[in-house]
Image (cartoon, rainbow, N blue to C red):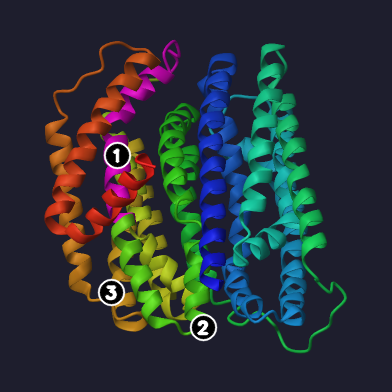
Amino acid sequence: MQIDGRKRRLAYNTFSSLLFQVTTIICGFILPRLILTAFGSDVNGLVNSITQFLGIISFLELGVGAVVQSSLYKPLAEHDEDQVSRVIKSANRFFRTIARILLVYVVFLVIFYPMFAKQQYGHVYTATLIIVISISSFAQYYFGIVNRLLLTADQHGYVQYNAQTVAIILNTVACFILIKLDCGIQMVKLTTSLIYLLQPFVIYLYVRRHYHINRKITYTEEPIKQKWNGIAQHVAAVILDGTDIVVLTMFASLSAVSIYSVYFLVVKGVKQLFLSMTNGIQSLMGELWANGEEKELKDLFGWTEWMIHTGTIFVFGVAAITIVPFVQVYTKGVLDADYVQPLFAFLLVMANAGHCLRLPYNLMILAAGHYKQTQSNYIVAAALNIIISILAVKHYGLIGVTIGTLIAMGYQTVWMALYDSKNLIKWPFKNFIKQVAVDVLTLLFMIVITENIQLSAINYAAWVLYAAIVAAVSIAIVSAINLTFYRTNTMKILKKVTTIFTR
């Protein structure tokens, strides 16, 4: 019964997360295109730059969010409501402090951002844009983030995913109408913030109804163990995700930020769609680890490693091949910047593929709560990314910032695989080496064999046909190579697919 419940919750989380990511991708392509055509590349770059600078405040989370989630696994598994309440109360105090600091940071940006960003708009224009974009960020920290962590830790993440899906659809419809009515960018982004403001309230009401959280509970000992040991992991994650746009804002131009944002929009969509399929795995690993179910954990890890590597190479391999033709179609008619950047596109896709390849090892570290033990890895990765990106952007522009991310991701993946092998589930490192060799071989075959497939016209119908052909050929390549090297796993997948289509 317990196993059936786990599988059911994992299925709910996976499906709702996948629906959320698909909705995010579709709506995420609609709005930037509207902004590009209505306001131009510089405004699009300005919006993305401000959003990224506001995201810097997440440095102050100091990794506490991940530690909170890990701290909830055991009391939730043991149905210890008092301990859950203590963790929630401690976490709320912390994140509400960040919300107050965010207000101060917004004032700082309003005063100083227009001075150091390479933009030609007036101070009032930029300052009002910063204020309206920051509203939803404040609400998330003050009202929403702790409840989201609770739901995710309890394998009920589907509640927040569904709420986010509805908010994204409402936002897209509202912004589409406003842009068509020739409203200013400030009004458009204010509407976005107000709609997203509703999410944390909906989630709060759900938690209040379904959980017995004692908001007045007291504690003498800090309930969140290793509270500050997630700092290195968190800071590294923020740097790896956000360095590029910050560096481009300070050392390049808003048009470069816009080009990066358009390509990253595609890559982020692909990455989030892929990551959505792994949502729920960390909490399941955490439960197995807390209960000492070693065999089940090892079986889950082995399957997860192969699935993530194989899926990453297929998804990101197809993306690397088809992304430039897609951007040509997407930016058709936008003539104020050169959006055809093939080498930059390939490196960006590979850097984000690296983020996904490290997932099974990172999920295991987080599920086991090994924050303090793995800090050095995150610090080195963050330093590599910052230093290489700043040095390389001056000479290579867009390409330079992706080099730093690619090297940092490669380092992290190898380090984490080694750590898991030696300290957690004793997974043989030779398994990792074999998996990476198969990954490289598969990607090379995909690139070489699809080289002569060309986009027939610059429109969406032609691109969909082109991408479908590339994907079909790639599926055949991935299946053939994995049947050779991972026959048991591949046959297991093929049987599941066959069962679905023969019902």
Q: Is any part of residue 397 visible from this angle?
A: no
Residue 260 is situated, as x and y percent measured from the top left of the image, at: 42, 34
SS label for mark 3: helix
- Going by the picture, which residue comes out furthest to the bottom? 220
Q: Is any part of residue 199 visible from this angle?
A: yes
Quadrant in the picture for the N terminus: bottom right
Residue 431 is situated, as x and y percent measured from the top left of the image, at: 20, 69
> How crowded is the residue under tag 3: few (<14 C-alpha within 10 Å), some, or many (20+)?
some
Look at discs 2 and 1 and give the one toward the viewer.
2
Residue at 53% from the left image edge and 66% from the top image edge: 4
> How crowded is the residue under tag 2: few (<14 C-alpha within 10 Å), some, or many (20+)?
few
- Magenta residues span 308-336
Alpha carbon separation for disc pair 3 and 1: 34 Å
Q: Which residue is mark 3?
A: 418
- Look at the image and say whether residue 321 sits in the magenta stretch: yes
Task: Look at label 1 and name its amino acid.
Answer: His
What is the total number of numbered labels drawn onto the structure image? 3
Residue 324 is situated, as x and y percent measured from the top left of the image, at: 31, 26
Q: Which residue is mark 1?
A: 395
Q: Which residue is mark 2?
A: 291
- Look at the image and say whether residue 326 sits in the magenta stretch: yes
Residue at 39% from the left image edge and 16% from the top image edge: 460
In the image, residue 383 sits, relative to residue 164, either above or below, namely below
Which of pointers 2 and 1 lies earlier in the amino acid sequence? 2
Quadrant in the picture for the C terminus: top left
